[in-house]
Amino acid sequence: MLSNFAATMELQNLVSQGQQERAFAMALGKNDLGILLWLCSKMEPKSLNGPPPMSQIIIMSLLQQLSAELESDSTLKLRWIKACLGLLQPSDPHIAGNASRVLSQLSERLTTASHTMGDGPDAADLSLLIFKVKKLSG
């Protein structure tokens, strides 16, 4: 628990200094969904737009990690996934090699969540995101 406290304090410091990219890189590198969700809850998805805009590697990593366990914290995760999909450029040379795999995995997770969550409050968002992922996948 203490390491999470230290991590959140460091993330808060990076955000207050306007270093969003570094904050996300650190949170993603921890491979701890709780820390990543904490960071997302402290920021707005529009922060991905910059300045400067978030790198494609960070955006793709966010999609990958936020799509885990969509049934919990779904509203927060779906807001961020939607923002990431709006900025993702699958043909970007930095991510092109992995983009189709990540989008396929995301599509599977969104589809599974739409079945398990039924007609809940996030159903419309899930349907829209599944459509967006298919469109990005080509």
Image: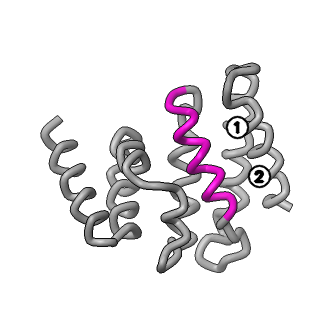
Q: Is residue 15 magenta?
A: no
Name the side, left or right, on which 93 lies relative to 1: right
Residue 133 x, y percent position in the rendering: 77, 52
Quadrant placement of the C terminus: bottom right
Q: CA distance from mark 1 to mark 2?
A: 9 Å
Please, what secondary structure does the residue beneath circle 2 have? Answer: helix
Asked whether the residues under the numbered discs 1 and 2 touch, taking CB atoms below 8 Å apart as contact, a structural biologist would say: yes
Image: magenta residue range: 72-86
The circle on residue 52 is none
> Which residue corresponds to the image point at 74% horizontal and 20% vertical from the top-left?
118
Q: Compared to 73, does 31 lie above or below?
A: below
Instruction: Please give the residue where the numbered disc 2 appears in the rendered image.
Output: 133
Taking depth in this image into account, of 100 and 32 the one nearest to the observer is: 32
Residue 93 sits in quarter: bottom right
Name the side, left or right, on which 127 lies relative to 96: right
Instruction: Please give the residue where the numbered disc 1 appears in the rendered image.
Output: 110
Q: Compared to 36, does 125 lie above or below?
A: above
